[in-house]
Image (cartoon, rainbow, N blue to C red):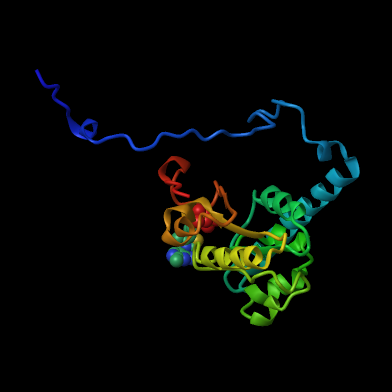
């Protein structure tokens, strides 16, 4: 007798895959494996810590300015300091950063001055003509829309055979939008913003 299939069982499986996660620290801070060599460079770690503290101090100040009407809109980045510093410190000067609105920590690491960031958020586009690398892109406000630019930059590097990378930063919510999913061939780094998202983590559906 022919087997009766129901629901999705009648469709053939066309792919199965696994995603492996490399973790060095457990959520409680205990080590899971030997740390990478840079983690034993105390001077480097101190510079990372300084950059994170600077980013947090800047963020708190910017929020105060915004709340008291002395700054226009401002995207809070509290809790994302390590993401920005970690990514930017792994980049070389000649690489290209394509940031979104919460990536101050990365911009500061790349040489953008605090007053330039404040100028931008105060509504003055001249803040985008910053002290950081001139080839970096300005903040991108429309969610995920810098992903096609990143793909273009990455393709230009590939075409010219230049050993540089385009680093595109966006929130995990952006992975549900079409520009990042269409451009997932470019290096893209979704960052989780637990305090600012309007939905719980389980509700977001990363697709890239
Ligand atoms: C194209 C577009 N739609 C809507 C918005 C309004 N908006 C600002 S922040 C935000 C949430 C984006 O979430 P996520 O990508 O996870 O980044 P997060 O802001 O949490 O860092 C939205 C929808 C926008 N900036 N751009």
**Vertical arrangement, residue 116 with respect to residue 207, above or below:** below
Looking at this view, name the residue that lies furthest to the left. Answer: 1
Q: Position of residue 160 (x, y in %)?
A: 67, 68
Q: Residue furthest top?
A: 1
Quadrant for residue 110, please give it: bottom right
Of 54 and 126, nearer the camera is 126
For residue 195, side relative to residue 207 (left or right) = right
Q: Residue at x 56, y 63 (%)?
A: 151
Residue at position x 82%, y 36% from top? Answer: 37
Q: Does the rendering let one see residue 115?
A: yes
Q: Position of residue 198 (x, y in %)?
A: 45, 52
How many numbered marks have been drawn onto this rendered protein structure? 0
* Residue 36 in the image, given as x and y percentages of width and height: 78, 35
Residue at 68% over, 61% down = 104
| 151 left or right, relative to 97 | left
Q: Residue 68: name its quadrant.
A: bottom right
Q: Is residue 73 above or below residue 35?
A: below
Can residue 70 be seen here? The reply is no
Q: Residue at x 78, y 73 (%)?
A: 131
Q: Going by the picture, which residue comes out furthest to the right?
A: 43
Q: Is residue 87 above or below residue 66?
A: above
- Tell me residue 86's x, y (percent): 72, 49
Q: Quadrant of the N terminus?
A: top left
Quick check: 199 left or right of 104?
Answer: left
């Amino acid at each position: 007798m022919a087997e009766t299939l129901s629901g999705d069982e009648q469709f053939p499986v066309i792919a199965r895959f696994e995603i492996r996660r490399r973790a060095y620290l457990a959520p409680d801070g205990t080590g899971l494996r030997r740390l990478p060599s840079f983690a034993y460079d105390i001077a480097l770690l101190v510079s990372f810590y300084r950059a994170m503290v600077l980013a947090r101090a800047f963020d708190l100040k910017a929020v105060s300015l915004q709340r008291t009407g002395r700054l226009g809109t401002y995207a809070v980045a509290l809790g994302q300091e390590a993401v920005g510093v970690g990514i930017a410190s792994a980049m070389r000067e000649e690489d290209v950063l394509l940031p979104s609105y919460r990536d101050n920590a990365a911009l500061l690491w790349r040489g953008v001055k605090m007053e330039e960031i404040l100028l931008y958020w105060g509504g003055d586009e001249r803040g985008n003509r910053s002290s950081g690398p001139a080839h970096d892109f300005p903040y991108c406000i429309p969610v995920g829309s810098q992903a096609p630019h990143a793909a273009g930059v990455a393709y230009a590097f590939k075409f010219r055979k230049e050993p540089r990378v385009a680093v595109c930063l966006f929130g995990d919510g952006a992975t549900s939008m079409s520009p990042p999913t269409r451009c997932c061939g470019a290096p893209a780094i979704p960052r989780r913003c637990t305090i600012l998202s309007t939905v719980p983590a389980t509700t977001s559906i990363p697709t890239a």
